[in-house]
């Protein structure tokens, strides 16, 4: 009876030892397994989750920030500033927001470095990129307000000639402003990318002809 009990204890110890060695082997094999990129992990874990397309995220971010700047700067400071002073402050605000917030959001959305550069006019990450974004915002702002002016002229509303028509003019508000600003932004970025592709193709053809 004692021998049988001793055999059972030996079997239990052997089984416990085998389990421990198996666990160690699994850990060693897991350590030697090939590395998996963050992109593959995100794709695997998010298969069953609803995800917005990247382009829609970018469009929403650009639209929302443009509308927010219109609300806080144009509406908020419109009581104190007028004319070119207000346009200058608005251009600075839009440029700063683009450089410090919008572009940073776009880079955080990236699964690979530089993936969303195609959605930015200024892709460099230097201190002077702020000034380029302010200049670019001023160009977009000019286009947006020219669109408002043209729309009012086509509707026959010109408060500069008749002040009584001011109530019937198309006013600036965040939603339409954001849409127009976004539209011109995408248009200019598309033109930039098209020109880059044209010059790149021309350079490659020139290099090929030399060979």
Image (spheres, grey):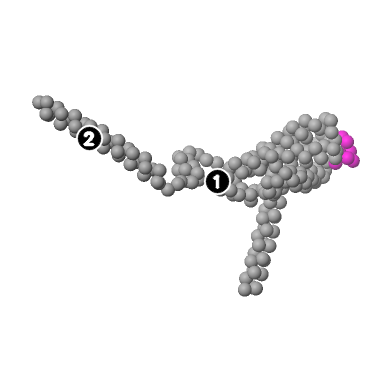
Picture quarter containing residue 109?
top right
| Whole-percent x, y for residue 200 in the image | 66, 62
Check the image and report above or below for 4 versus 58. Answer: above
Q: In the rendered image, is residue 182 in sight?
A: yes
Q: Nearer the viewer, residue 10 or 49?
A: 10
Q: Is residue 66 left or right of residue 53?
A: right
**Which residue in the protein does label 1 denote?**
111
Q: Is residue 94 left or right of residue 38?
A: right
* Residue visible at 19% across and 32% down in the picture: 10
Q: Give the residues in magenta.
A: 158-164
Q: Nearer the viewer, residue 5 or 107?
A: 5
Label 2 CA crowd tier, 10 Å (few <14, some 14–19, many 20+)? few
Front of the two marks 1 and 2 = 2
**Which residue in the protein does label 2 denote?**
14
Check the image and report above or below for 191 versus 82. Answer: below
| Whole-percent x, y for residue 94 in the image | 74, 40
Q: Would you say the residues marked 1 and 2 are in contact, meaning their CB atoms lie under 8 Å apart?
A: no
Q: Residue furthest left?
A: 1
| Whole-percent x, y for residue 158 in the image | 85, 41
Q: Is residue 154 left or right of residue 2?
A: right
| Whole-percent x, y for residue 18 in the image | 26, 37
Q: Main secondary structure of the magenta part?
A: loop
Q: Nearer the viewer, residue 157 or 4?
A: 4
Q: Nearer the viewer, residue 164 or 86?
A: 86
Question: Counting residues from the N terminus, which is met first, the one under dot 1 or under dot 2?
Answer: 2
- Measure how far apart labels 1 and 2 are at the Cα level: 48 Å
Check the image and report above or below for 69 versus 187. Answer: above
């Amino acid at each position: 009876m004692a021998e049988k009990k001793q055999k059972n204890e030996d079997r239990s110890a052997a089984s416990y030892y085998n389990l421990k060695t198996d666990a160690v082997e699994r850990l060693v094999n897991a350590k030697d397994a090939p590395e998996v990129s963050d992109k593959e992990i995100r794709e695997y874990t998010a298969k069953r989750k609803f995800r917005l397309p990247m382009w829609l995220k970018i469009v929403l971010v650009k639209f929302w920030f443009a509308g927010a700047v219109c609300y806080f700067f144009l509406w908020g400071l419109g009581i104190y500033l007028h004319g070119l002073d207000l346009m200058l402050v608005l251009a600075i605000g839009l440029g700063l927001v683009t450089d410090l917030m919008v572009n940073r959001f776009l880079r955080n959305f990236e699964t690979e470095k530089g993936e969303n550069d195609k959605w930015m006019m200024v892709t460099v990450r230097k201190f002077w990129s702020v000034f380029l974004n302010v200049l670019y915002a001023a160009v977009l702002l000019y286009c947006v307000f020219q669109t408002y002016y043209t729309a009012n002229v086509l509707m026959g509303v010109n408060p500069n000639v008749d002040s009584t028509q001011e109530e019937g003019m198309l006013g600036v508000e965040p939603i339409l402003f954001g849409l127009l600003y976004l539209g011109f932004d995408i248009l200019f970025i598309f033109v930039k990318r098209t020109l880059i592709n044209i010059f790149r193709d021309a350079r490659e053809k020139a290099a090929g002809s030399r060979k």
